[in-house]
Image (spheres, rainbow, N blue to C red):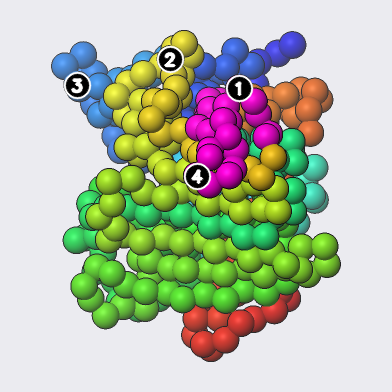
Amino acid sequence: MARIKVGVVGYGFAAKSFHLPFILAIPDYEVVAILQRAEAPADPAPATKNSHCTVDFPHVKHYRSAENFFADPEIDFVVVATHADTHATFAEQALRAGKHVMVDKPFARSTSEADSVIELAKQKGRVVTCFQNRRWDGDFQTVRELVKQDAFGGITEAEIHYDFDRAPWLHVLKKKEYTPGDGHMFGLGTPTGTAYLGTHSLDHAYVLFGRPASVTAFLRTQRGIESEVEDSFTVILQYDGPQRGLLVTVKTSVVSPMAQQLKYWIRGTKSSYIKHQARSTCPQEEQIAEGVDPLDHNFAAEPARFQGTLTSYDEFDGEVQKFDEESERYVGKYPTVRGRWLGIYQNVADHLNGKAELAVKANEVRDVLRIIELARESHQKGATVAWK
């Protein structure tokens, strides 16, 4: 089967750290072109690694013009790894050129932008998806496994956190007036990187529980200035039908001096599960920063001390849980499923080759953007707002 020819838009931190290492690790792909505005060094020999795509990938075509990049007939699949305000624009350019496309998160700055991209993909008969790699975080995969095994029974309450202890980028966030796409619910880009907070944690809530019936939100700034652009938030999701008793809280705090940050707290009629995050939000993040190959046999392994605790009325896993006399519950450290960000790119390759259903569907990501919009509306009105 022919390899999928990949063109990458952008050669910043996202492309170098979160996309290319995983694309290159999968034999189904071949990177053939990179769009980077910066001029290539006249002599790449003395240039430092990661300074330019021509230095790191001398045999890959380098484009400085989007028009020329998208006109390249060799490119089958475009990966958009640029600043959030260009995601929808580049996605539409790729689709108009007849390419399949993966857009980094957030997928767009609004549901109207997302709808435009989705409609164009339908017209062109091309695949469009979003880089929701955090669905392949180890701790989220663990929660999904427990749900699949009916460990919790009926889930009554869930807390999903994405907290930081003295977030290092706060001092550069000076903007005071809000425009669509701003704030940590979307993913707030900074000169030192980008923190995608709500687009991860709200996506996790959506994957687990689907569309909420209503949204209640409280947006805050903890960075010491008056601003319409939130850096912290609490979003409460309520549901109807069989899930009408469920309460889901999604939180981000950027000032949180805790030895261990809470990540998940899932409570059900049978069991509860509480999980704190490791040094970063997922071992894959810190290992990629350290230059570990995604194919390394230890990649994404989480230290045992960060395993979550599963507590049940009745024994669920005899290898893990032991009866605790004091609490009269079965308690144990539940092993974390090993994360696998490779999974999102492998799934797209399998889908393009007709071997698998697409895991991250654009309409799902669009719904998460709608939750973000309703959360801001709720905050502004000081009221719960219904899904619409």
Residue visible at 36% across and 61% down in the picture: 253
Between discs 4 and 2, the one toward the N terminus: 2
Q: Quadrant of residue 282?
A: top left
In this rendering, the answer to whether 157 lies above or below 357 is below
Disc 3 from disc 2: Cα separation: 31 Å
Tell me if I can see residue 260 in this picture.
yes
Residue visible at 80% across and 50% down in the picture: 123
* Disc ID at residue 326: 4
Can you give x and y, in whole percent of width and height, for residue 384 in the image?
A: 61, 82
Q: Amino acid at mark 3?
A: Ala
Task: State left or right for residue 224 relative to residue 105.
Answer: left
- The residue indicated by pointer 2 is 298
- The residue indicated by pointer 1 is 319
Disc 4 from disc 2: Cα separation: 37 Å
Q: Secondary structure at mark 2?
A: loop
Between discs 1 and 3, the one toward the N terminus: 3
Residue visible at 39% across and 25% down in the picture: 303
